Amino acid sequence: MDCLSLRNLATRLDVCVEGSDGNVFKTHCLYPSFSPVFVTISVWGDGFRVSDGGGAAESVVRQGLNPHALTSALKAARNKYNLAEKNGVLSLKIDSADWLENAILAVSNASAMAANLAYAYVDQKSAKDIVPELILALSVFAKPSQIATDYPVRGHSGKERKFDVAVIGRRNLLFKTVSPYAGSVNSA
């Protein structure tokens, strides 16, 4: 594929519509639900304001996740990209149109990051919910005195790792719970 074909494809992907709060621009960033991140660009004094319009929060709530999971995620995204955050809306004020492209990228990346962190937090919590079920299933095969939780194991490197559940015997059987989400799998 040549560069002209790629540019034509990118042009088709770009969507901008005029809204009551400013121009709404569809970015190439995605939320964990695979819906695109939209930013709103409005005139602000002599410059511009670029905002996610609360898109990260909406993405989290729309998927039925606890909105409280978003609080620390928004803070992390705000700090990483040096943005403002108020009532779940990430924004950036710039003085010149020269910075508009960078502002769009910063706000859209921060919004996607916040949603991803919130999803990972919720999935991490749900992985911990598996532990009681795992213990119940293992109690059919092992005595309760042989089942331990938060079991520490020191590896060859000398670093200690904790496993959610262990069945202690001649050869220990170790379990680390994960949920089917990349953040949960990678952290485990």
Image: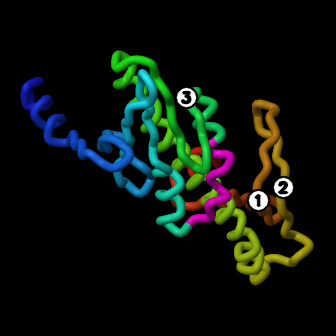
Whether residue 176 is visible, yes or no, is yes
The answer for how far apart the CA atoms under marks 2 and 1 are is 6 Å
Q: Secondary structure at mark 3?
A: helix
On residue 164, the disc is 1
Q: Along the horizontal axis of the image, is 65 left or right of 26? A: right
Q: Secondary structure at mark 1?
A: strand
Residue type (three-letter) at the residue carrying disc 3: Tyr
Residue type (three-letter) at the residue carrying disc 2: Tyr
For marks 3 and 1, the one nearer the N-term is 3
- Asked if marks 2 and 1 touch (Cβ < 8 Å), the reply is yes
Residue occupying the point 55% across, 28% down: 81
Is the residue marked by circle 2 packed among few (<14), some (14-19), or many (20+) residues within 10 Å? some
Whether residue 37 is visible, yes or no, is no
Q: Is 164 situated above or below 99?
A: below
The kind of secondary structure the magenta stretch mainly shows is helix
Magenta residues span 65-74
Q: Along the horizontal axis of the image, is 159 left or right of 128? A: right
Q: Residue furthest front?
A: 45
Of residue 124 and residue 146, the one placed in the foreground of this image is 124
Quadrant of res 18:
top left
Question: Which image quadrant: the N terminus?
Answer: top left
For marks 2 and 1, the one nearer the N-term is 2
Residue occupying the point 56% across, 55% down: 119
| Residue identified by numbered label 3 | 81
- The picture places residue 60, in percent across and down from the top left corner, at 52, 59
Of badges 3 and 1, nearer the viewer stands 3
On residue 151, the disc is 2
The answer for how far apart the CA atoms under marks 3 and 2 are is 38 Å
Q: Residue furthest bottom?
A: 140
Of residue 46 and residue 125, the one placed in the foreground of this image is 46
Q: Is 169 situated above or below 14?
A: below
Membership of 101 in magenta stretch: no
